[in-house]
Image (cartoon, rainbow, N blue to C red):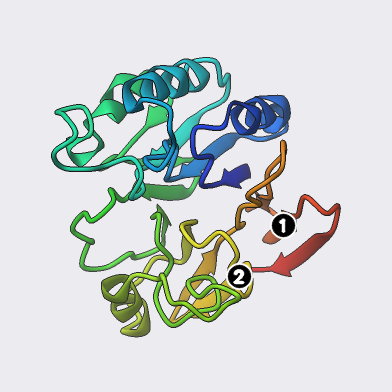
Amino acid sequence: MRILHVSDLHSADAHFQFVKKVCGYFDLVCLTGDLLDLNSQRPVGDQIERVLAHLGTIPVPLAICSGNHDSEAGLGPRLEHAAWLKEARRKNVWIDGDSFKMGSHAFRCIPWSGTLPEDGANEIWLIHAPPDETPTGISVGGAGWGDFEFGELCRAGRGPRLALSGHVHCPQRWYAKAGRTVSLNPGRPDTASTLNYIGLDLARGVVARSHVSGDTDFLKL
């Protein structure tokens, strides 16, 4: 099974176009939050409509979790708990709160600020913020943006086997280990028409992260 993992598209049309361009090589696309950009000058309603239109044209199975830019109280009912994501649901599209299986692999989409399961068993989680105190959750400048509760769960040995995240645009490293959990964060370039992305080949147990610079790094699970 082959997975495409990208994050933090922030409503950029070019980033969604890139996902649509490469997704045919994969069995599942995982988008791990911040599909919108609440700091943008573009009206949020317009962003939602544009993003939903892009999501509707991705032709392969799709799993999504919300990020901090997708869910905001006080900006209308569609942004409460990222309610707008429900409009993206169709066959073979999974969103916040959903769990599903593909082959022998179990997946779970964790909402932004949602309650974490007590144990990840052998699951793969889509969760926007990586565990705290890990290179995937700390920026190259040293700021920690990881999730404390998630970090505690991982350090207690109750995290998922794989955590697909984002949130930190320039992490110290794109992979990390916390307890039994392998944390992956592709990072995001702020000025590029393409994205960093991670490709997972679960059958072979190999992960590759492709950077916009053209560099590719590999990890054996």
x 58%, y 45%: residue: 6
Q: Which percent across, then down, holds residue 33? A: 42, 45
Residue 17 vs 115, above or below: the answer is above
Residue 26 in the image: x percent, y percent?
A: 66, 35
Dot 1 and dot 2 residues touching (CB under 8 Å): yes
**In whole angstroms, how far apart are the C-alphas of marks 1 and 2?**
9 Å
**Residue shown at 53%/81% (left/top)?**
142
For the N terminus, the quadrant is top right
Residue 132 picture quarter: bottom left
- Image-based side of 82 in relation to 142, left or right: left
Q: Report the residue marked by disc 1.
A: 209
Which of the pair 146/41 is nearer the observer? 41
Identify the disc placed on residue 100. none
* Disc 1: CA contacts within 10 A as few (<14), some (14-19) or many (>=20): many
Quarter of the image for the C terminus: give it: bottom right
Q: Inspect the image, locate mark 1, and give the three-letter code of the amino acid beneath it.
A: Arg
| Three-letter amino acid code of the residue under disc 2 | Tyr
Q: Which quadrant of the view contains residue 99?
A: top left
Task: Name the residue located 62 percent from the left edge and 42 percent from the top edge.
Answer: 4
Quadrant of the image occupied by residue 88? top left
Above/below status of 209 relative to 149: above
Within 10 Å of the Cα at label 2, are there few (<14), some (14-19), or many (20+) other Cα atoms?
many
Q: Residue at x 54, y 15 (%)?
A: 57
Question: Which residue extends farthest right?
Answer: 214
User: Could you say whether the residue bearing mark 2 is in a helix, strand or loop?
Assistant: strand
The mark found on residue 175 in the picture is 2
Give the SS element for disc 1: strand
* Nearer-the-camera pick, 100 or 178: 178
